[in-house]
């Protein structure tokens, strides 16, 4: 038998490929080429490019990993289970994309660095259209539990000009680690939208973010457990910011000092998004005169939007 593919395929974590005879190699290659040719009549060039590349990478993966038929059936069963657990409130495929870093890679590709424009991060599965509107300085917690947090900042273009009337959507988990869509009673809490003022300023009361696990009672959770990874996300508050003529920004603000910053289960942390949440002692005067009996925190998050054509 002639070994035509031995030794590491490249990359420090890859295992050596098992030896494969020239005859076997030829059969595997012939099949791949036949599948590639099957897309030859596709009229849509982008679709053709995507399908051919997908097949080439998929076959390269199979030929490198060489799954048993039982292993391949287990992979199909995993995807089937992901489909069964998915509905309009639970999106297991988003979780899979997130935990494999595919969401962040797609975000990196589509949000090219542009001057000092604020970096983007994962969208996650918990955004809901139609959040309540709050005024500047309003409270987006709507009774969700947690330490009050005053959030303030500006929205500007990358030329530094303030963006008046920018729409800011914010959403976050309560201190139990639950988003409102995970409550049993259907109420809306810890989500809202507001608009910047003439100077591009915004502020609101939210909740000091705390760490929470992504939903891990399904196949993605089992995958994380099997590979020894935690489902926890670093503490964060979600933002989506939109202004005419500017690229939509989906991002988070993270909490400096959080132990999970280097272990976020969905690879969403960027150093530029980590901010100081300044802890305030009970009785400290608040920016808007609101009376708070216990502790509260405050954070500044200035947001810079890239031009739409960036
Ligand atoms: C979130 O931050 O809401 C989230 C992101 C990715 C997966 C699960 C949750
Ligand atoms: Fe989140």
Image (cartoon, grey):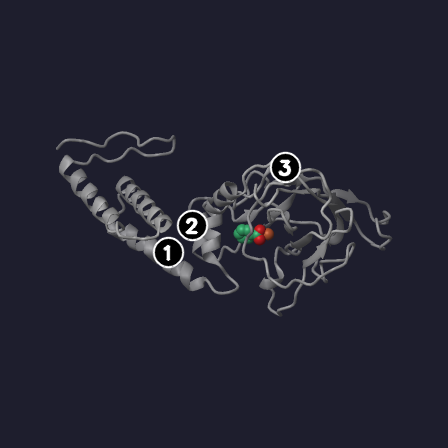
Cβ–Cβ below 8 Å for labels 2 and 3?
no
Q: Which residue is mark 3?
A: 272
Q: Position of residue 247 (x, y in %)?
A: 60, 46
Q: Counting residues from the N terminus, which is met first, the one under dot 2 or under dot 3?
A: 2
Residue located at (59% from left, 58% from top): 127
Q: Quadrant of the C terminus?
A: top right
Q: Counting residues from the N terminus, which is met first, the one under dot 2 or under dot 1?
A: 1
Rounded to the nearest angstrom, the CA distance separating label 2 from label 3 is 30 Å
Q: Quadrant of the N terminus?
A: top left
Q: Position of residue 158 (x, y in %)?
A: 66, 39
Nearest the camera: 208 or 135?
135
Cβ–Cβ below 8 Å for labels 2 and 1?
yes
Label disc, if present, on residue 78 of the rendered structure: 1
Q: Is residue 90 left or right of residue 57?
A: right
* Location of residue 69 with respect to 85 vertically, above or below: above
Residue 269 seen in this snapshot: yes
Residue located at (55% from left, 43% from top): 268
Q: Quadrant of residue 180?
A: bottom right
């Amino acid at each position: 038998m002639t070994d035509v593919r031995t030794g590491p395929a490249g990359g420090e974590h890859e295992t050596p490929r098992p030896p494969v005879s020239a005859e076997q190699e030829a059969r595997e290659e012939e099949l791949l080429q036949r599948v590639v040719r099957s897309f030859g009549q596709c009229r849509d060039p982008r679709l053709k490019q995507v399908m051919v590349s997908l097949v080439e990478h998929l076959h390269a993966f199979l030929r490198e990993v060489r799954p048993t038929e039982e292993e391949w059936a287990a992979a199909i069963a995993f995807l089937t289970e992901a489909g069964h657990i998915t509905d309009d409130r639970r999106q297991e495929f988003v979780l899979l994309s997130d935990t494999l870093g595919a969401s962040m890679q797609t975000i990196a590709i589509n949000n090219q660095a542009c001057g000092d424009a604020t970096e983007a991060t994962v969208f996650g599965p918990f955004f809901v259209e139609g959040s309540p509107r709050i005024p500047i300085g309003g409270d987006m917690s709507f009774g969700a539990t947690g330490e009050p947090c005053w959030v303030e900042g500006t929205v500007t273009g990358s030329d530094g000009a303030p963006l008046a009337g920018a729409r800011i959507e914010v959403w976050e988990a309560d201190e139990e680690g639950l988003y409102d869509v995970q409550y049993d009673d259907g109420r809306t809490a810890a989500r809202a939208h507001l608009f910047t003022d003439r100077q591009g300023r915004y502020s609101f009361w939210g909740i000091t973010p705390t760490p929470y696990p992504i939903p891990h009672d399904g196949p993605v959770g089992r995958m994380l457990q099997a590979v020894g990874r935690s489902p926890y996300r670093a503490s964060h508050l979600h933002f989506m910011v939109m202004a005419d003529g500017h690229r939509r920004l989906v991002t988070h603000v993270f909490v400096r000092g959080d132990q999970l910053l280097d272990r976020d289960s969905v690879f969403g942390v960027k150093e530029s998004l980590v901010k100081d949440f300044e802890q305030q002692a009970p009785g400290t005067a608040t920016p808007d005169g609101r009376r708070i009996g216990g502790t509260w925190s405050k954070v500044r998050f200035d947001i810079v939007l890239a031009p739409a054509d960036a």
